Image (tube, grey):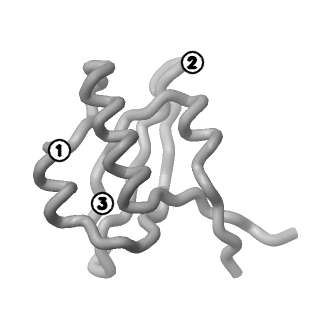
Amino acid sequence: MRETVKYLTRDLFIELNDKAIRGKMNRTLRANAIKERLEDIKYPVVSVFMSDETVARCNIAVDSEGAEVQLDMLVDDYNKLPTIPVN
């Protein structure tokens, strides 16, 4: 069975961050910073912690050096993230 990894595109990253800001979630990013800095690539979710029944706290890789950011999102949104197969 092939393993998969969830990821965010630039547009999805911005959309979910904006939603987290509107929802007053604990882990968000400055909207202007991500709009200016993110490239049009796939950003893998490297780990997730279900902080409660409705919120998933995701660690997302943002560069090839290993830097990560945290973003809170609704579990429903997390479950809908696209996936990519890995070896």
Q: Is residue 40 left or right of residue 27?
A: right
Q: Nearer the viewer, residue 19 or 5?
A: 19
Classify mark 1: helix, strand or loop: helix
- Amino acid, disc 2: Glu
- The residue tagged 2 is 53
Q: CA distance from mark 1 to mark 3?
A: 16 Å
Q: Residues within 10 Å of mark 3 (few under 14, many from 20)?
A: some
For residue 68, which numbered disc appears in the image? 3
- Amino acid, disc 3: Glu
| Image location of residue 38, percent across then percent down | 25, 65
- The residue tagged 1 is 31
> Upstream in the sequence, badge 2 or badge 1?
1
For residue 11, which numbered disc appears in the image? none
Q: CA distance from mark 2 to mark 1?
A: 26 Å
Q: CA distance from mark 2 to mark 3?
A: 24 Å
Label pair 2/1, CB-CB below 8 angstroms = no
Image: 74 above or below 81: above
Residue at 27% over, 34% down: 27
Image: 49 above or below 6: above
Q: Residue furthest right?
A: 1
Residue at 29% over, 72% down: 39
Q: Residues within 10 Å of mark 2 (few under 14, many from 20)?
A: few
Asked which quadrant contains residue 20, the reply is: top left
Foreground label between 2 and 1: 1
Classify mark 2: helix, strand or loop: loop
Which quadrant holds the C terminus? bottom right
